[in-house]
Amino acid sequence: MKSSFQDQVVWITGASSGIGEAMARDFVKRGAQVILTARRADRLKRLEDELNAGKASPVARVLVADLADLSALSGLASRAIALFGHIDVLFNNAGASQRGFAIETPFQVEEHLIRLDLLSPIALTKAILPHMVTRRSGRIIVTSSLMGDLELPGNATYACVKHGLNGYFYSLAFELKSLGIQVQVLQPGFVKTEVSVSAITPSGERHGKMDSTHESAMTAEEFSLRVFPKIEQGKVSIYVAGKEYFAVILRHFFPGLYRVAVGKFAKSYLKDRMVHANPDPKL
């Protein structure tokens, strides 16, 4: 069966590792050309060489960028379009997680997370939308998280940006449908990637270790395998998770019970991510 991504150009942010890297491979397997964006040029170059190996013409090109630089995103979109002549799919996948209580996290650190995780996908989407509107076709995919439905201690800013992504892009899906542009929101649970290793602490530095909840989770390759059929089916809201998805069900249908459960179990269940957080901060 022919993939809906056959002969399409897909721009992937956060493509140097994890979900972005795994899905870049699977987009190419489905006949797409990909534009790979992240800050780490060496990793992108290795992936570009791998994807282009044995091909008569390039199916992957690299566009290095710091997506937290919002003022550069309009020009970045123009450069991305020029690489293959057009873009069919924008996959907003770049972002960072958080480890630490809000009271201990300087506003400057929160501001950086909000800029990278929320404002950057919005700005990049707005930069590419005129191109898609002119062509009256396109697809925007954004990687959110189960945290777009949940609230947990040590994740206030991360929950903020993921709730914001959900609100913005679910609303945008209604607005763009009549223009032939599809919006899809991916909500992964725990995935074994570098997301916890590179999570930002109150000091602004990396968490530096993989949480046990991620260590035992599905791989990025498994996530990609599970998510692609749902993307191809055209679903707007796409959940791919393990048993942690039951927290979403509990939050939706029994919010009071959810809060009791978080208060009772979060400290032990999320102990790895609480290492930077003082449970009894001195006010």
Image (cartoon, rainbow, N blue to C red):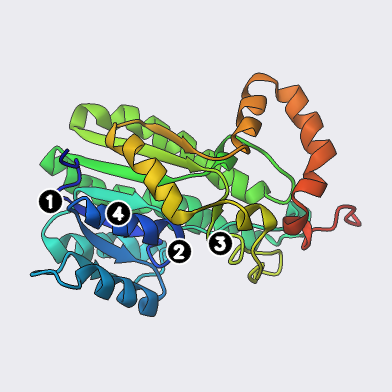
Using the image, determine if residue 177 lies above or below residue 254: below
Q: Say which label, 3 or 1, has the lower sequence index.
A: 1
Instruction: Tell me which residue sits at (33%, 51%) in the image.
Output: 91
Label 4 close to label 1 by CB (< 8 Å): no
Q: Amino acid at mark 2?
A: Ala
Q: Secondary structure at mark 1?
A: loop
**Residue 92 coordinates in the image, percent (x, y):** 37, 52
Label 2 close to label 3 by CB (< 8 Å): yes
Q: Say which label, 4 or 1, has the lower sequence index.
A: 1
Q: Nearer the viewer, mark 1 or mark 2?
A: 1
Q: Nearer the viewer, mark 4 or mark 3?
A: 4
Q: Which residue sits furthest bottom?
A: 42
Q: Secondary structure at mark 4?
A: helix
Q: CA distance from mark 2 to mark 3?
A: 7 Å
**Front position in the image: 132 or 90:** 90
Identify residue for label 2: 68
Label 3 close to label 1 by CB (< 8 Å): no
Q: Nearer the viewer, mark 3 or mark 1?
A: 1
Asked where in the image residue 202 lies, by quadrant, the reply is bottom right
Using the image, determine if residue 98 lies above or below residue 56: above
**Residue 76 coordinates in the image, percent (x, y):** 28, 64
Q: CA distance from mark 3 to mark 1?
A: 36 Å
Q: Which numbered marker is on residue 112? A: 3
Identify residue for label 1: 7
